[in-house]
Amino acid sequence: MTIRNLDALFTPKAIALIGASNQPGSVGSVLARNLLDTGFSGPVFMVNPHEEAIRSTLNYKSVADLPAVPDLAVIATPPATVPGLVAELGVRGCRAAVVVTAGFGEGDRSEEKKLRQAVLDAARPHLLRIVGPNCLGFISPARGINASFAHLTPAPGGLAFVTQSGALATAILDWASARNFGFSHVISVGDMADVDFGDLLDYLAVDPATTAILLYVESITHARKFMSAGRLAARAKPVIVVKSGRSTAGAKAAMSHTGALAGADIVYDAAFRRAGMLRVHELREMFEAVVTLSSGVQVNGDRLGVITNGGGAGVLAADALDERGGHLAALSPDVIAILDKSLPGTWSRANPVDILGDASGERYTAALTAMLADNAQDAVLVLNCPTAVASSTSAAEAVVAAVPEHPAIPILTCWLGDPAAREARALFTARRIPTYETPDEAVRAFTHLVEYRRNQNLLIEAPPSGSPETVPDRVAVRKVIDAALADGRKLLTEPEAKAILRAYRIATVDTRTAADPAEAARIAREFGEPVVLKILSRDISHKSDVGGVRLDLETPEAVEKAAVEMLETTHRRVPGAKIDGFVVETMVHRPTAHELLLGLAEDSVFGPIVLFGAGGTAAEMIRDRAVGLPPLNIVLAREMIARTRIAVLLKGYRDRPPVNLDAIAGALAGLSQLAVEFPEIAEFDINPLLADDKGVIALDARAVVRPAPANAATRLAIRPYPVELEHIAAISDGSEIFIRPILPEDMPRLVDMLHKSSLDDIRMRFLGHMRNFPPLMAARLSQIDYDREMALVAMPLPNEPDFGSIVGAARLVCDPDNEMAEFAIMVRSDLKGHGLGFHLMTELLAYGRRRGLKQVFGEVLRANTTMLAMAKELGFSTAPTAAPDVLRVSIDL
């Protein structure tokens, strides 16, 4: 389930409290007080088998005695009673319940877990939704609902706070109350037996009362649902996350470096980033980020200009910027020349621009005006330290006057101090100019903007399951995997792993296998150059740990001697290991190359992950790595690379030239494609992958396989671009058209299609007049999550006049429960009457049937007789709507 019946939680007409109490200080007593005293407009029923009244309100002995059906029930009774109560409530027609009671298997207690399942089993026949158990409850201040045992009811506002920790919720409410933050909803989800983050993100994404969503996350259930709902919500409004458990304790023991390095937190970090969310690490930082992102300020990069009347404040800002990965903008010669004319001769002549402690308002105006005229910075931070020789308020007034109504370069301010800065901060707030109390807070706000913009850009990437530039040899990979599984092996040999890499066009060193030392020497003689010798064993993953690797052996005799010694050493260190022979490969000499680690692993929550970082034998000690969720394309792969420390070295330094980053990114995209196409791959390592200006080459590889898991089709947290839907179709006039799913880069093509269509056709599609097509609407229509929505576009074939244009588009938007979907369809005006619209509609219906939808519907203007006739021909039924000029057409699939 997802949002089904959540309206009963957020907008109930009646509420029942099961377990109400008169005992002072009890949970039932606090719940009763909060429900009765918050101003809910509907009836609140108290249920307790032993009381006549609760807080002077008539009490009912049982659910059966209730005079009306409650939409929402709050349950605070002993655990053993909850399944029966849920069943009773379901029979009565109740549609949602908040279970605050603990004791449903929060740890590993099997009996309690059975009780938890009994609650779900009792709710399922009635589609009754469960929030909790083991939660604080639910609060919706604007609706007068406080169905929690929190100590206060927050003020109404635009923030929705969803938390797994009830204790943290009360602390946040207390903190926010003192700082005048208001909430649309506060939801404590507890153990998430039913309603989880994905469900609530789906609801809050379209909730008009919610302007931003805050999440406190300890764990995620149903990764694809979370990612799909999160990506939808993040497109609509800021989603800010605090995730606890950032330590490496969750990293699992694994046979590959990747499996060992991929601790749980780094995967969560990658998921939040890919979903377009902003992750912060402190609760105070969460609210700072809300204020910043809600201000409407946007940045295009990470270059910051700083103006200050105090050198120390400027240095603090520069230090904070460096620590958080931003950059001080360079001052151009023209700006320096302008500032030379306006500032004292002792100004800093660098960024931060120190305009000295006696800076007047005029000096602030001159400095800010000069910097705003230059495009070398992505934002300007203006700092002020209180002094006895210049007015902080006058400086603030000058800044406000100098800032255009809609500045192309965002302005952030930081007036230090308290009494001296209050009036200035009020001025900034009135003009909606973001203002902060310390340089560190201001810089953190800037980097929040930078990271949020970067994550939003990642959100629109729609990589396919496979790279169109690289067609792998899938047959070869299938043979390798099937042979290993038939042999009862999990660990592939190095030659097998390298064969898979070559099938995916990732270069490997020339590698051959030998059965014994003599054959190893013969192979070395054939190579005629220095070689590397490695032990070959299905039981040994990290060969260097057991003395199983020897480098730069120059003669066949040296190879044979090393092989004999290697056998003795390996048998001594790993007595039970089966030795299959040796691997002999050419010794690669690339002195300026960097050793990198690329890998695949399986996360227990988010499924397959791709890892990149510094490689070599010390990879696990250095722990320089970044994780991404497949599918990846070159853009996403390069972003992964940029998040590592070694990325700085890859740009080149001293006598080492910059590496070929596209070659590394291509290898990452190839591994991603391997993860998508072969669910049998559990772990895969390339370590080291040598990378230099000439390209990349894999020196060593290991892989772990297993039979394809039962969830092979849905194991990816993000559904790839469905390349399988691309095809050439014949329409009724006999012509052919290319049909494919929409891509983010189609936005200008959509706009162009509308510009070439009549105003009347646009009115028919969008149910109203629209002279201009807003860029945000175009972006929303072209940037979709393929798990929730499908949009097909029709394009002329090559060598036709309109090749590269979109001439028709059809869309299905599924409800979160995957039962119903709304359609929309449009054909460019000059191509109507050729059968393209009819064909696109039949394609949508076929897709809906394959997806398992129960119904497809749409709203059509009565004046759109062509669409209504087509719907009738396809078997749609027609019904009126509340709008007299609009009809609802629907078809059961």
Image (cartoon, rainbow, N blue to C red):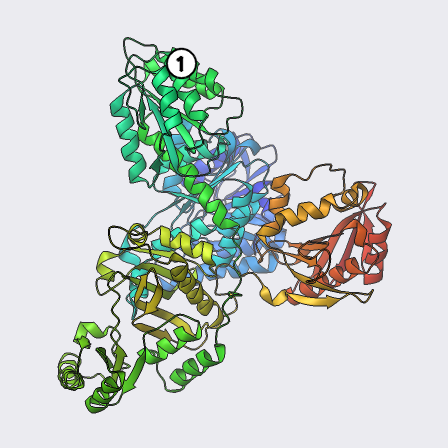
User: Residue 319: where, in percent of width, then height?
Assistant: 27, 34
Q: Indicate the quadrant where residue 855 lies.
A: bottom right
Residue at image location 55% in from the left, 52% down from the top: 129
Q: Does residue 493 appear to the left or right of 860 in the view shown?
A: left
User: Residue 559: where, in percent of width, then height?
Assistant: 17, 83
User: Residue 35: where, in percent of width, then height?
Assistant: 51, 35
Position of the N terminus by quadrant: bottom right
Q: What amino acid is labelled 1 in the image?
A: Glu
User: In the depicted view, which residue is nearer to us: 595 or 22?
Assistant: 595
User: In the depicted view, which residue is nearer to us: 721 or 855?
Assistant: 721
Residue 646 visible (yes or no):
yes
Assess disc 1: are there few (<14), some (14-19) or many (≥20) residues with their C-alpha within 10 Å of its C-alpha: some
Farthest residue to the top: give it: 389
Residue 112 visible (yes or no):
no
Residue at image location 32% in from the left, 72% down from the top: 701
Tell me: residue 424, above or below residue 469.
above
User: In the depicted view, which residue is nearer to us: 745 or 131?
Assistant: 745
Q: Does residue 8 appear to the left or right of 590 in the view shown?
A: right
Tell me: residue 801, above or below residue 880.
below
Task: Give the tally of numbered discs.
Answer: 1
Q: Indicate the quadrant where residue 761 lies.
A: top right
Q: Secondary structure at mark 1?
A: helix
Q: Indicate the quadrant where residue 681 lies.
A: bottom left
Tell me: residue 648, above or below residue 427.
below
Q: Which residue is mark 1?
A: 423
